[in-house]
Amino acid sequence: GNTRVVVVTSVSHFLGTAASVLPAPSGTWEPLFPDGAHPGILRSFRLYGTSKLQNVLFAYKLQRELPDISVVLCTPGFVATNIGGSDRSATNKGGMEGIPLARMASDGGSVLAKAATIGSPPSGKFVVPYWLWEGVPLTGRWRGIFHNVLQEMFLQRLTPAGWLFAFDTHPASYDTGLQDAVWEWSLNQTVGW
């Protein structure tokens, strides 16, 4: 069909794990701030990566549920936004705008717009505005750190604006049982909304 859904994810989804996308069997999550302590930058990135892996799992399940629509996974890249800041006003960009490797928010927006209009969207892959070394001999979180730091921050600056590439997602994202479990958990969380 002509209907297209663009699901925003991040190369950070490689930091997530199959075990981290659902609460423990008891129905609880590991506390984000145990004893009021901040989880630290590395754990914060892993939590962010987990949320992005959930987006990937959701997108693949959505495509299976509605095969007549086109679902495209896309990352805008490393964009200068106010993510992580408490001041979410349009005038406050937080500290990200001072990072020279970050692209402007409008560049990220144009990547998403292009993903929404791409002629033949890739199936089982995500659209990225820079080249990824898929054969990197790293696994799990080390692969996520490599893609996040070395590739997203540096290679996007070397890639001409407007270029898009399609790459495989996290190996766990292709697990249809995990896709189904995240979908069901999400439905249960939104009952009554």
Image (cartoon, helix red, strand yellow):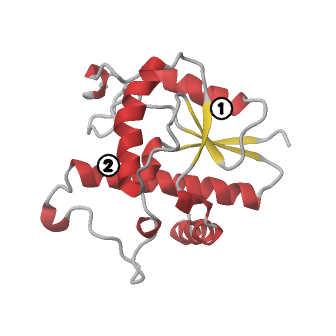
Residue 129 rendering spot, x and y as whole percentages: 54, 28
Residue occupying image coordinates x 47% and y 42%: 10
Q: Would you say 28 lies left or right of 135 here?
A: left
Q: Nearer the viewer, residue 151 or 107?
A: 151
| Amino acid at dot 1 | Ala
Residue 154 rendering spot, x and y as whole percentages: 38, 26
Label 1 sits on a secondary structure element that is helix
Q: Would you say 20 lies left or right of 59 here?
A: left
Give the quarter of the figure containing the C terminus: bottom right
Q: Which badge, 1 or 2, is on the more N-terminal residue? A: 2
Residue occupying image coordinates x 39% and y 77%: 24
Relative to residue 136, is residue 78 depicted above or below? above
* Distance (Cα) linking label 1 and label 2: 25 Å
Label 2 sits on a secondary structure element that is helix
Residue occupying image coordinates x 60% and y 22%: 163
Residue 142 rendering spot, x and y as whole percentages: 35, 51
The tag on residue 45 is 2
Residue 18 rendering spot, x and y as whole percentages: 47, 66
| Amino acid at dot 2 | Phe
Characterize the local packing of mark 2: few (<14), some (14-19) or many (20 or more) Cα atoms within 10 angstroms: some
Residue occupying image coordinates x 42% and y 82%: 25
Residue that carries the numbered disc 1 in the rendered image: 115
Residue 145's quadrant in the figure? top left
In the picture as drawn, the residue positioned furthest to the bottom comes out as 26
